Image (cartoon, rainbow, N blue to C red):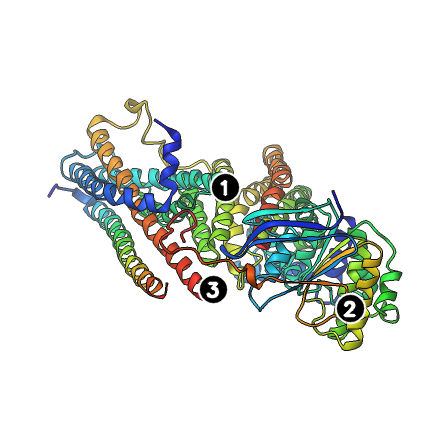
């Protein structure tokens, strides 16, 4: 694949026309996969011998937690692209992804709390994983607030990109700090290449479908929201041009 | 560079410079805590390291927006940026001045406040050491936040929102060190981690702060 | 590299929108150039770009290393420091020590121990301009230097500029009033106002 | 409907909360997309008329 061709999509017009064609497909696929994964998981999987029917929450909890982190990683990559190559679409994509990532973080936290209540006997514990997600939520909040606070679009893109970079380093540091601070209740990662160790097949396959659904939903939402940001940006540019006379 | 440091310190000392503001805030926090949690000295002594660290952190936070805001308003920042000083040096000096006027007094006052919260005997040395090691990181990180929000009206709340998550690792290791020290445990691990964070932030973060400040001055 | 500034085919932007384009001029040692143009045309942006505070969109700005000094709308004066403390600070930043000549030139010597906050607006402005002398730089870039100066102070300022030019310095000044500097050239930046882009040009810059 | 046993409330509320949040997110995104598109068209029309 020609890498240079990829930068073509950094042109706003090209991006809009391409996503015009792609977005409907991604949307349909994401709804299908999400519905399939959740219905399969909710209706057609057995109960866990220890956790009972609460294990069904895994089909939302794990994918949303994964997407909460992946959304931040995506923002990190697009921020770097903006800093290095100054492609406007890249910065706007990061802006578009942040609220989606934040909602994913909230879903992961809420489902975790609801799940934790019967399993651990508490809604909230200062467990390293839970705490890390709470910190991640704060990072999303600050990032979005900074975008909203700055009027000049290029300045905002520059500042939020640097914040995203610095924030990533500190988020990692926090993760280690929190681990050191409290060894927790949470079970190990549910997903890993060595699946036998973690989740049985009956739970694993619907989980995979559900994860695919969340990934596709994320992509569809980011594409949609990036289009909105591009249009909003063009609108501001047109209005500014008008003011200049 | 030394001229800038001396000027900032002098400004902090003169009327309206805000020197001692953080210290007064620290005192208020420490005085209010017993009213909130009750006067039992066993309880107080167990939470003292955490409260002292938290109080120091909040006192630090309180004075962050002064780091650049005044120089921004009167145009000094533009003039400094065009002066023969690298921007990295300017932000480093600013952070150092902030630490000298806010962090260092907190470190020195901490033992007195420890008395008020019946900090155990063994806890004083680790507390002071942890604050001494950790507050520079708070100033440097805070300078980054202040540089991010320098051009904004009503940037104060945003500044706190941006800086607080960045403070988490420093707070965890700093408070952990003070707590372990008070409990008579080994403090080597948090000590090393805290020192690492402080060295890392001092070495790297000024570049980010300088980049951010340049963007904001455009 | 000659002293002074050489600007060629410069395009500058404010807030992401081009304001001036195709601007070229040269400022040699011993010369002064006065920029004219209506409010909002981009004089301040131009001066800030030349001073290095913001990057140009395109074009070149050439000048020798460490020869420029910029003075903006605000003077950067600290109200709680005395006049001489303010000046000494800037002198030290620029690697100089002596401030007496600068105090003398703007008749600030009797005020030198007064806190800058107690000065009148015009006196503050004079202090801001005295800062230029202590930097020891050759090329002065001045944005509306005569705001709040009385007639006498404007003459004082013109004399300082003349002396600076005589010593081989140069000055780039954006101002609306007549400084009485007959030797200064005048450049009206109005004709260089950037043309608005076609609205169908939906490209990287969104306009 | 599967028998969720004594944890029915837990599981159902987790699903309800999550799906509600996702629907809100999608709705807000779509609504804003539509509104901004409309606004941009208006501004473009005006800009074209004025040249």
Q: In the rendered view, tell whether residue C127 sits above or below residue A208.
A: below
Confirm whether circles 1 and 3 share one chain: yes
Q: In the rendered view, tell whether residue A81 sits above or below residue B103.
A: above
Q: Quadrant of residue A28?
A: top left
Mark on residue C126? 2
Confirm whether circles 2 and 3 share one chain: no
Asked whether disc 1 touches disc 3, contact meaning CB atoms under 8 Å apart, the reply is: no
Callout 2 secondary element: helix
Query: How far from the left and from the top, in percent, is residue B216?
Result: 57, 54
Query: Which quadrant is home to the N terminus of chain C?
Result: top right
Q: Which residue is mark 3?
A: A244
Query: How far from the left and from the top, in percent, is residue C30?
Result: 79, 56
On what subunit does the disc labeled 3 rest? A
On what subunit does the disc labeled 1 rest? A
Query: How far from the left and from the top, in percent, is residue B5?
Result: 75, 52
Looking at the image, residue A101 sits to the left or right of residue B211; the answer is left
Give me the C-alpha separation between circle 1 and circle 3.
28 Å
Callout 3 secondary element: helix
On what subunit does the disc labeled 2 rest? C
Asked whether disc 2 touches disc 3, contact meaning CB atoms under 8 Å apart, the reply is: no
Q: Residues within 10 Å of mark 1 (few under 14, many from 20)?
A: some
Q: Is residue B50 visible?
A: yes
Residue sitting at 43 percent across and 55 percent down? C197
Residue sitting at 47 percent across and 38 percent down? A175
Residue sitting at 78 percent across and 54 percent down? B6
Mark on residue A118? none
Q: Which residue is mark 1?
A: A83
């Amino acid at each position: 694949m020609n890498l240079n061709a990829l930068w073509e999509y950094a042109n706003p017009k090209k991006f809009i026309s391409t996503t015009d064609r792609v977005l409907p497909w991604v949307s349909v696929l994401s709804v299908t996969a999400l519905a399939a994964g959740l219905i399969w998981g909710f209706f057609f999987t057995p109960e866990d011998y220890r956790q009972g029917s609460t294990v069904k929450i895994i089909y939302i909890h794990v994918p949303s937690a994964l997407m909460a982190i992946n959304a931040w990683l995506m923002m990190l990559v697009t921020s770097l692209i903006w800093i290095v190559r100054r492609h406007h679409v890249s910065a706007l994509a990061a802006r578009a992804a942040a609220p989606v990532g934040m909602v994913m973080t909230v879903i992961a936290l809420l489902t975790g709390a609801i799940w934790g209540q019967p399993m651990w006997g508490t809604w909230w514990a200062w467990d390293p994983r839970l705490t890390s997600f709470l910190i991640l939520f704060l990072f999303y909040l600050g990032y979005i607030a900074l975008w909203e606070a700055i009027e000049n679009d290029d300045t905002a893109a520059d500042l939020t990109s640097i914040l995203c970079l610095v924030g990533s380093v500190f988020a990692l540091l926090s993760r280690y700090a929190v681990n050191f601070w409290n060894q927790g209740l949470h079970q190990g990662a549910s997903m890993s290449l060595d699946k036998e160790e973690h989740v049985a097949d009956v739970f694993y396959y619907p989980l995979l479908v559900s994860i695919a659904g969340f990934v596709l939903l994320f992509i569809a939402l980011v594409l949609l929201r990036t289009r909105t940001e591009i249009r909003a940006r063009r609108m501001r540019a047109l209005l500014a041009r008008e003011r200049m006379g | 560079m030394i001229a800038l440091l001396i000027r900032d310190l002098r400004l902090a000392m003169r009327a309206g410079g805000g020197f001692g503001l953080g210290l007064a805030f620290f005192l208020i926090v420490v005085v209010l805590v017993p009213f909130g949690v009750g006067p039992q000295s066993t309880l107080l002594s167990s939470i003292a390291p955490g409260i002292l660290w938290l109080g120091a952190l909040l006192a630090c936070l309180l004075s962050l927006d002064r780091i650049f805001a005044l120089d921004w308003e009167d145009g000094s920042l533009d003039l400094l940026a065009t002066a023969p000083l690298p921007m990295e040096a300017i932000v480093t000096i600013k952070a150092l001045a902030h630490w000298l006027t806010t962090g260092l007094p907190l470190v020195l006052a901490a033992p007195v406040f420890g008395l008020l919260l019946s900090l155990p005997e063994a806890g004083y040395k680790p507390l002071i050491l942890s604050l001494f090691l950790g507050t520079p990181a708070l100033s440097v990180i805070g300078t980054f936040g202040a540089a991010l929000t320098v051009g904004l009206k009503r940037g104060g709340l945003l500044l706190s929102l941006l800086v607080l998550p960045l403070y988490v690792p420093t707070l965890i290791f700093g408070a952990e060190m003070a707590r372990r020290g008070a409990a008579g445990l080994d403090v080597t691990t948090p000590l090393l981690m805290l020192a690492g964070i402080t060295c890392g932030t001092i070495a790297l973060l000024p570049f980010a702060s300088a980049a951010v400040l340049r963007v904001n001055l455009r | 590299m000659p002293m002074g500034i050489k600007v060629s085919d410069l395009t500058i932007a404010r807030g992401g929108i081009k304001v001036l384009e195709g601007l070229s001029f040269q400022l040699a040692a011993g010369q002064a150039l006065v920029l004219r143009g209506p409010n909002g045309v981009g004089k301040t942006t131009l001066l800030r770009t030349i001073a290095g505070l913001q990057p140009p969109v395109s074009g070149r700005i050439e000048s020798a290393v460490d020869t420029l000094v910029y003075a903006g709308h605000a003077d950067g004066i600290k109200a709680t420091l005395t006049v001489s403390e303010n000046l000494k600070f800037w002198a030290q930043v620029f690697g100089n020590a002596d401030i007496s000549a600068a105090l003398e030139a703007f008749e600030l010597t009797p005020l030198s121990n007064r806190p800058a906050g107690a000065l009148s607006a015009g006196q503050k402005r004079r202090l801001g301009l005295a800062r230029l002398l202590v930097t020891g730089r050759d090329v002065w870039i001045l944005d509306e230097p005569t705001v709040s100066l009385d007639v006498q102070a404007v003459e004082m300022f013109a004399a300082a500029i003349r002396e600076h030019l005589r010593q081989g310095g140069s000055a780039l000044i954006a101002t609306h009033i007549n400084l009485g500097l007959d030797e200064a050239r005048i450049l009206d930046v109005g004709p260089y106002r950037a043309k608005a882009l076609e609205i169908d040009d939906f490209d990287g810059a969104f306009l | 409907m599967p028998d969720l046993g004594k944890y029915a409330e837990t599981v159902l509320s987790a699903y309800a909360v999550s799906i509600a949040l996702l629907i809100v997110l999608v709705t807000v995104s779509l609504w804003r997309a539509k509104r901004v598109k409309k606004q941009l068209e208006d501004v473009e029309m005006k800009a074209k008329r004025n040249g």
